[in-house]
Image (tube, helix red, strand yellow):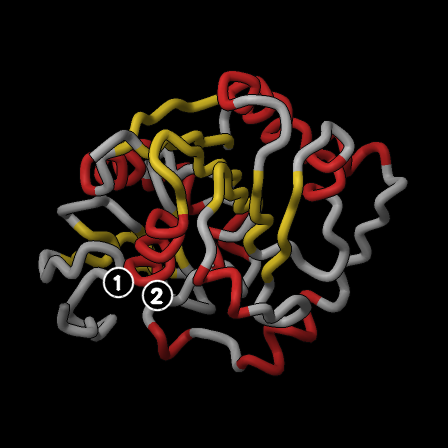
Amino acid sequence: MKIPSDKDYCPLCSSSEIDVFFADKYRQYLSCQCCELVFVPRKYWLSTEDEKALYDLHKNDSKDMGYRRFLSRLSIPLLKKLEKLGTRRKGLDFGCGPGPILSALFEEQGHEMDLYDPFYYNNPEVFQKKYDFICATEVMEHLGSPDREISALFAMLNQESWLGIMTKLVIDKHAFSTWHYIRDRTHICFYSKRTFAYLAQRFNAELSFVGDDVILLKKKKD
């Protein structure tokens, strides 16, 4: 597949049907008419050093009950899905950050977890493994090459296994214009329900939404 230029192509589906969706004093946001991804052109991205400096400010304590409750919005429904696969399953916390709390929630229920984060747990060997479930909480909005990265995640899943995602969803242009989510300059990709419907069709996955920001995708049998 041709590597897309963010000037002409959507970084998720490579469509050239791109429109300006919104602009503020910091950045421009483009919208794909095919998959409805909203994305920030590369010229507005932070440097790797500045991006990591912002992540280093995140102080996630495994004993922080508020943060554990926040992550449980994904872990609880995904754990219910995993019950049908058996007791001890193999999972990956993708983009776990400096304090991997989500993995602990699954390990406490008897599951085995691997960690991956390009800044804090850069373990490329995970991409050679297969998993029964993969979690990506507050990760999708940071992806610079969502086509490549999401394709890799699905390739790492066993058949009838789960990809659990937590990310805020685009509603409409008006809501987007006042959305706190776009104020974080490490956020460069924004997804809607229609974007995830596109992904489900593309990767032959069963799609379900839990609440406002949790998405579950089950990889079907070939």
Q: Is residue 180 visible?
A: no
Q: Look at mark 2 in the image and give the residue it sits on.
A: 145
Q: Which mark is residue 11?
A: 1
> Measuring 37% from the left and 60% from the top, which residue is drawn there?
149
Q: Position of residue 137 (x, y in %)?
A: 57, 44
User: Residue 162 appears at what percent x and percent y?
Assistant: 44, 34
Q: Residues within 10 Å of mark 2 (few under 14, many from 20)?
A: some
Type of amino acid under label 2: Ser
Tell me the SS state at disc 1: loop
Name the one closer to the observer, 66 or 62: 62
Q: Residue at x 33, y 26 (%)?
A: 207
Residue neighbourhood size for the residue with mark 1, other residues' Cα within 10 Å, grouped as few (<14), some (14–19), many (≥20): many
Measured as percent of width and height from the top left, residue 99 is found at 76, 55
Question: In this view of the protein, which residue sits in the foreground, 114 or 119?
Answer: 114
Q: In what element is the residue under mark 2?
A: loop
Q: Give amino acid for label 1.
A: Pro
Apparent side of residue 197 relative to residue 93 in the rendered image (left or right): left
- Above or below, 211 against 137 in this view is above
At x 52% / y 38%, what residue is drawn? 166
Q: Does residue 177 lie above or below 10 as drawn?
A: above
The quarter of the displayed image where residue 25 is located: bottom left
Whole-angstrom CA distance, mark 1 to mark 2, is: 6 Å
Question: Which of the two residues, 159 or 167, is positioned nearer the viewer here?
Answer: 159
Q: How many marks?
A: 2
Q: Does residue 109 appear to the left or right of 194 in the view shown?
A: right
Q: Quadrant of the C terminus?
A: top left
Residue 123 in view: yes
Q: Are marks 1 and 2 in contact (CB under 8 Å)?
A: yes
Lateral position of residue 138 relative to residue 156, left or right: right
Q: Is 11 rendered above or below residue 92? A: below
Q: Which mark is residue 129?
A: none
Residue ID at (60%, 24%): 79
